[in-house]
Image (cartoon, grey):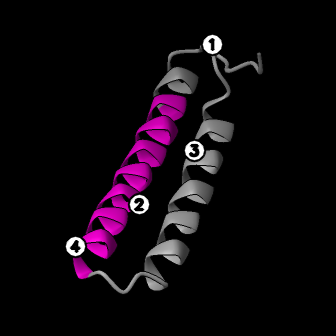
Amino acid sequence: MRDNAEVARRHRLRAEELRTIAEGMQDEGTRKILLRLADDYEQWARAAEETDRVNKRLGRFSISN
């Protein structure tokens, strides 16, 4: 089982990177795409955290690979 807290952290870092890159984009279409991708990474981070909460509730523990 993956360490979902670490997965969430990495997804949030990637979202932050994408938002930073988007700030420097002059093309509005490209900026919107990058911001949507950043939002997707945030959703994935929340999903990983929720998976972690459910696993803990069920007595399953995450381990790092």
Q: Which quadrant would residue 65 be assigned to in this image? A: top right
Mark 4 or mark 3, which has the lower sequence index? 3
Determine crowd level at label 3: few under 14, some 14-19, many 20+ residues with C-alpha closer than 10 A. many
**Tag on residue 38?**
2
Q: Main secondary structure of the magenta part?
A: helix
11 or 64, which is in the foreground? 11
Q: Position of residue 29 (x, y in %)?
A: 22, 73
The quarter of the picture where residue 59 lies is top right
Residue placed under numbered mark 4 in the picture: 29
Mark earlier in primary sequence (3, 1): 1
Is the residue under label 3 in contact with that under label 4 (CB below 8 Å)? no
- Residue at 51%, 41% in the rendered image: 49
Q: From the viewer's perspective, tell me whether residue 52 is left or right of residue 1.
A: left
The residue wearing badge 1 is: 1
List the single residue furthest toward the front: 27
Q: CA–CA distance between discs 3 and 1? A: 14 Å
| Element carrying mark 3 | helix
Q: Residue at x 33, y 75 (%)?
A: 31
Q: Which residues are magenta?
A: 28-53
Q: Residue at x 62, y 58 (%)?
A: 13
Left or right: 47 as drawn, with respect to 58: left
Q: Which residue is mark 3?
A: 8
As measured in the structure, the alpha-carbon distance from the residue carrying label 4 to the one carrying label 2 is: 14 Å
Tag 4: Cα neighbours inside 10 Å, few (<14), some, or many (≥20)?
few
Single out the mark in the foreground, 1 or 2.
2
